[in-house]
Every structure is written in structure tokens, then in C-alpha cells.
Amino acid sequence: MPPPRRALLTSLLRLRSFSSIAYPHPHPHPPATLRRHQFVADPTTSTSRGVIGGIGGVGAGSGNPLDPTQLLRDDPVAITASLWLWVLAYQKAYADETGSYLPRSSITASTLASLLTLRNAVLDARFRFGNRLTPFLQSPRAANAPDPATLSKRKLRALLTTPGPPPFQDRVVQELLLLLLEPVYEARFSPKSFAFRPGRSPHAAVRTIRRSFAPYLWYIKGDLSPLLHSPDPALVVGALIRDVRDKKVVDLIRSALLTPVVTASDEAAAKKKKTKRKYQKKKVLPEGEPKPDPYWLQTFFGFAPEEAQTQPDWGHCGVLSPLLANVCLDELDKWIEEKIKEFYKPSKSDVVGGDDGIEQGNTSWPEFVPTSGPDKTRKVDYIRYGGHFLIGVRGPRADAAVLRKQLVEFCDQRFRIKLDNESLPIEHITKGVMFLDHVLCRRVVYPTLRYTATGGKIISEKGVGTLLSVTASLKQCIKQFRKLEFLKGDREPDPQPCFRMFHATQAHTNSQMNKLLLTMAEWYRYTDNRKKVVNFCSYIIRGSLAKLYAAKYKLRSRAKVYKIASRNLSRPLKDKKGQSPEYHNLLRMGLVDSIDGLQYTRMSMVPDPDYTPLPSGWRPDHEKILLEYIKLTDQQTLEEQRNCIREEGLITPQDYISMLVWGYKKNAVLLPSKVSDAQGSTEDLGSDTDELDEKELGNEGNQSFPKLAEMS
């Protein structure tokens, strides 16, 4: 046999081996439900299949099946990614516990064995949340913890009644459930919901408001935070089972919601409260314990808006709580989306929304709305961040009142939350609407419109319209600074010394405050008054540090500090008695200029606001991938793509391989190198491959083959 034909036979044999994977074998392997018991220590335990059961099911592999490392050596597809997801969940829980990432190659064999035991306990319904007496998997920070079976009754009672962090194995199971459910729901959530979702930060919410809320006159603000604080387990499970049919997953989440959490009583908390001593010892962190957040980050967290301060924590759900909160509130999103379609009534005399519902106007300047007549397009838009939502209404106030009445009835029936007119105020845009500590207001502008007329003449005309302004609330900023004890007073804020940094060096203190200022400048990136509010923050922090240095180096006043250390506090300071130890050490090492001055001491140094418009229909990249995957799994979409390929006269690689195999079986021809008519070949493939005659598949020298369609 010539060498080319031998190579073709080899490729066909390889195709045959692939077909043995795709099609059932004459003697199939035993089902995964039975094979899984070869990895279970107790063969008498019962099993069930489902989402977790499918992940727990393990295919037959070479070597010792009781060795967990063997499961990681096998093909992930062959073992249906069973232990891989558990290892990934363990790595995430390990990073949260210790503050450092653990590579998969560094996981010990004993840890893998414990992880396998935990997986089997979950599959066999032997796992219980909050169980401290039967640890299947030990925490990496408590690897040498004593066995609960060897403890005395007094220590066992203290172990069960003393509140503390959840067991480490609970967090691994929570991470696993999050890995399973988050991809399922992310593509199904409404694009109008933000918070507790990857890629949907407060900045994305503010940019969405700037992009889409310019034409609205009336706004309804609502707060559903009681749902995030104390949820109804029946409500959560009812919202979950509409999309999740796996009983084991639902039972795990129901158990996490219903299992009571050990909390400290008021008397015990009063006993533990110690009197503040005049001199406190420095706390020495144990080895392996993660370091606390730096001071600048703790200070910035104090500026969190009201909408972002509520973090759901439901029972033993842990990191799964935010996802479950979005699952419940997604019903509100879907309901309001239906109301948006119901309230939409276009007007031909209004530039906002035409007959087809497409917004008209300058897409590069979406905040500007030209003035229209009295007959306006009636429409509604909506955005939700966590438990807080904002509804914009364009039209008469009566439409907003009707929508508010329907919203009260829906929340009462579905969420059992009593709302009234005071909790759902209707505000006009001219008075300012605050959301995420950003004030939405509207002002009349007269821009100069330039366009080219007939003959190439450039004409400039004065236009009139309204402009949506998104500004940072300076009043709210002062309130947060006062809460953090950086200033006192309201009308005339007076900076106060930051005594928490009293024992830190000048270089370290300036570095910490520069990080805070840079983060504040990034937080107010999309506000119109970014320069003003960031410069005000710099003034407060600079005055606070100047008073701190005056008290530390005994320089009496801020003016003396500014005279020695300059305006941005970049020069080393001296006290009354001469050179400070810090200055002496810096001078001896030649690092006098290493002290960084404070940022943004002048308004011209603050970056300009970012007015880049958010693209219409914006979604994060991972959501686009999930939506594309769901679309490709639809049979109708695949048929449309197949018809498009046929119309273009192309052929898919799958059909090409089918022609190869069919031609070999029917006519004993290894390769149809050429086909005379490309259109005829595609029609034959679409109708019936049995009609391919010997002339189309047998003649190797006088035929041409159509181009292959590149399939992604």
C-alpha cells in the first residue's frame, strides 16, 4: 500500500476511535452511580445523582482508585470534573482563610483524601452545616487541632455554645455551590441589576444612569434592605427551585438557611467587654494569620454609600448569600421590565423615542436632551443596586403614582414587605435625586450647534435643552469625614488631628494618605465636580496631618508645619529640641528626599472627570460568553447558522468528515479530493447523503471540493 493511503487509513482509524467516544459502546461501562462507590469508604451508604452527583461521579481510571492524586492525573473530561471543582473551591476557601493563594501542586495527599471524604459525605447526605463534632476537612490554620472525640464534656459544651467563625468545611461547600450556581444565574439575571455581581460595580451603575436616565423627570426611590437582613427561607427556596431542579443542591441550601447559627448572648458580651486601659500593648499576630487591612483602606471603607453598606449574610450560606439575594430580587427586576413595556407610549413630536422605541439624538452626548413640546414620550426605566432601586418616569406625575401603587402591592404579595408612600418618595429631577452618594440633577443649557449646510457653508445655531448632571454630594462627604473623626463642624469644617498615625513615621503616614486620596479620586471619577470634591478631601487630610505633626513635633500650629515641611508636607520635620530621630536617620542614609508629598494639594492637579459614554446595551465580557453559549445550545440557532452556511456555498468541517466516512463505506474511496459542483454537494448534504453517486465521490482527478466554513 502506498504511504499516502497508509496515512489516510491511520487518520480514519483515529476518527473511528473518536466515534467510539461519541457513540455508545456495545458493552457500556456500569453507570457512574455504581462506579462512584469504589471511592467511598463505606459501601453501604446510599447515593443519588444530580448536579452535585454528576460532579461527584467519577469515571474509571488507571491506577489505585482510592488515591485522590490519581483522580487529578486523569483526564478532567473523563472524570466529569469531579475533584477539580472541589480542589478549586478548596483553593478559594484557603485564600480567604490564610490570605495567600495555594497552588494545586502544593496540596498534600492527606488534604486531598480529606477533601474526597467531604465530597462523599455531601453526596451521601451525611454533611451538616455548622457541625463542629465531625470535621471531614480541617482548617489550614488549625491543622493540629485536637479531635473532638477526645475532649471533655466541659470543652465540648464550650465548643458547641461559643460563637465563632464557621467551620472551614462549610466554606468549601459554600464555594462549591457558588461555582455551580453563579454561571447558571449570571446569564439569566436582568441587565438592570447591579451589586453582588462580577463586573457590575457602582461605577457601572453610575455610568448606566448617566447613559440612560437623562430624559426622565420623576424618580421613585425604594429600599428593600429588610429582605437582605432577615429573609424568609420558603421565599428563597421557592425562587431557587424555579431554575434549579437538582434536589441535592436545593436541600443543601435549605439546610444552610434553616440550621441555627450560634450567637453570643447579651450577658456574655457584657462580660467580655473590657475597660479601656491607658496604655495598650501592641497586638502580635500569630503566625499564619492574615494581616488586617491598612489604615487607608479602612478609612476608605468608611466612605461606602448607604446602598453598598448592606451585605447579606444568611445563616450558613456565607459567600452564597449575595447570589441568593439576587435570585430573590430578580423577580422584581422581571416584573418592572414588564411594566416598562406596558408604560411605553411614544410621541412623534418628542425626540426621545420614536415609533420603534429607539432613542434618537447624539449618542456621543447622551446626557443632553433637546427641548420638546408638551406631548412627551411616556416611558419608564429602572436600575437596582443591591436592595435599593431607582425608577425614572418620563411623563406626568400620575404615571409615577400609578406605578408606585402597583409596586407596593407587588412587594406586599411577593416579598411580604410593607411599603408606603413615605418609603417610596416621588422626587422631581430639578430638586436633586441622591443615589449611591451621587446627586442627579438637571439644568438648562444653550449649546452651540454647528453643522454643514448646502454648498459647504458651516452654520452655527444656538440650541436649547436639558443636561443631566451627576455630581458628588459634598454634604455627604463632610458627614463621612465627621464620622471618621477627621473634622468637626458642619458649615465651616475644621480638620482634626489623625492620632491613629501618631507613632508612624512621616514617610509612612504620607504614603497611607496618598493611597487614600488616589482611591478617592478614582471613586469620584465619573462625577462632574470631581476636581472640587477631591481637592476638598485633600484639604481635610492635609489639615489633619498638619495638626498631627504639630502635636508630634511640638510645633504649636499648622502654619509652622507648613513653613518647615512645605505645602504638601514633603520635607522632613524638626522638633524644638533639634533634629528628630526620623530626620537624622534619613539624613544619615541619604534618603532625605524620599518622603512623598501629599497629592492634589491644588485643584489643577486633580484629573478631569471621565465623560466617556457607556456603550448601548453594555454587558461584562463573561456575560456575553455565557449568553453566546446558551444561544449556541439552542437547536433553532444552530439550524439558522447551518442554513446561512449553505446559502454561502460553504461546508462545515463536521459535514466534510461525514462525507469522508460515508464515501469510504459506500464506494471504498479513501478521499474525495475534488467535487465538481460545490452547490450540488451542499444540497446533497442537506437532503440525503444516500443520493451521492459514484461520479461525485469516485473520480479523484476531475473534481473540486468546496471551501470549509470556519466554525468557532
Image (cartoon, grey):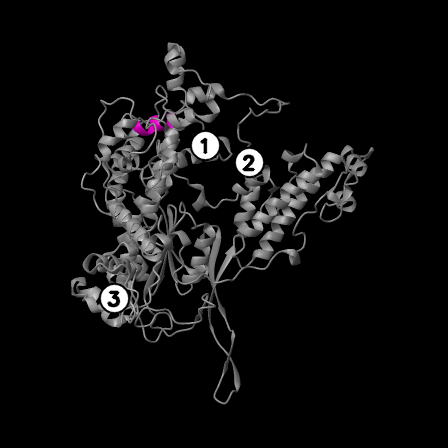
Q: Earlier in the sequence, mark 3 or mark 1?
A: 1
Secondary structure at badge 3 equals helix
116 inside magenta stretch: yes
Measured from the top left, where is residue 103 in percent x and y?
A: 48, 35
Q: Which residue is mark 3?
A: 643
Q: Nearer the viewer, residue 208 or 531?
A: 208
Along the horizontal axis of the image, is 106 left or right of 31?
right
Quadrant that contains the C terminus: bottom left
Mark 3 residue type: Asn
Front label number (3 vs 2) = 3
For disc 2, the neighbor class at 10 Å (few under 14, some 14 to 19, many from 20) is few
CB of mark 3 within 8 Å of CB of mark 1? no
Alpha carbons under labels 2 and 1: distance apart = 18 Å
Q: Which residue is mark 2?
A: 293
Q: Which residue is mark 1?
A: 94
Q: Main secondary structure of the magenta part?
A: helix
Above-or-below relation of 445 to 586: below
Along the horizontal axis of the image, is 493 left or right of 174?
right
At 43% across and 62% down in the image, what residue appears?
615
Span of residues in magenta = 114-120
Front label number (2 vs 1) = 1
